[in-house]
Image (cartoon, rainbow, N blue to C red):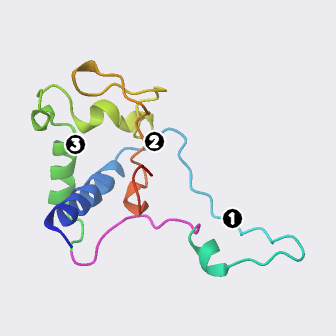
Amino acid sequence: MEWRTVLGLSILSVTVASCEKEEPPHHHHHETETPAAPTGVQVDSAKVALYAVLPATADVKTNPSTPEKIALGQMLFSDARLSKSQDISCNTCHVLGKYGMDGKDFSTGFAGAKLDRNTPTLYDSAFAFVQFWD
């Protein structure tokens, strides 16, 4: 695996773990039974398993979360010094109090540029296998 991918996954894991400290408004995971398929419909149980209840954390066994990593993730997530202009942070667009997004139809990017899409949520993003289909 490329070092940038490993670094990105590590930071994302720490960031997601740090997000667990803040409770989103009315964010609930409900454990429910999978509804039965209509009569005569074949269901691929492997595909249904993809929609299981998510685990509480996204720890990687080879790189588990620690209180120090969580604190670092929280600090980096809010640190505007990491941006080119030094005036925006991850939390500028991925507002943890707004489900990890900004709530705009079209988000604002660097130097106030209007983007073609909105800011995706970061909640549960450690479990996403892709970001943006394009």
| Residue nearer the viewer, 1 or 74 | 1
How far from the left and from the top, in percent, is residue 111?
22, 21
Q: CA distance from mark 3 to mark 2?
A: 16 Å
Can you identify the residue that label 1 sits on? 32
**Magenta-drawn stretch, dominant element (helix, strand or loop):** loop
Q: Residue at x 22, y 78 (%)?
A: 62
Q: Earlier in the sequence, mark 3 or mark 1?
A: 1
Q: Amino acid at mark 3?
A: Phe
Question: Taking 96 as reference, is 18 above or below it?
Answer: below
Q: CA distance from mark 3 to mark 1?
A: 33 Å
Q: Earlier in the sequence, mark 3 or mark 2?
A: 2
How far from the left and from the top, in percent, is residue 75?
16, 43
Q: What residue span does the magenta drawing correspond to?
A: 51-62
Quadrant of residue 51 within the rendered picture: bottom right
Task: Indicate which label's residue lies in the foreground, 3 or 2.
Answer: 3
Rendered image: mark on residue 24 = 2
How far from the left and from the top, in percent, is residue 119?
40, 36
Residue 55 in magenta stretch: yes
Secondary structure state at the residue bearing disc 1? loop
Q: Residue at x 29, y 28 (%)?
A: 109
- In this rendering, position of residue 7 left or right of residue 97: left
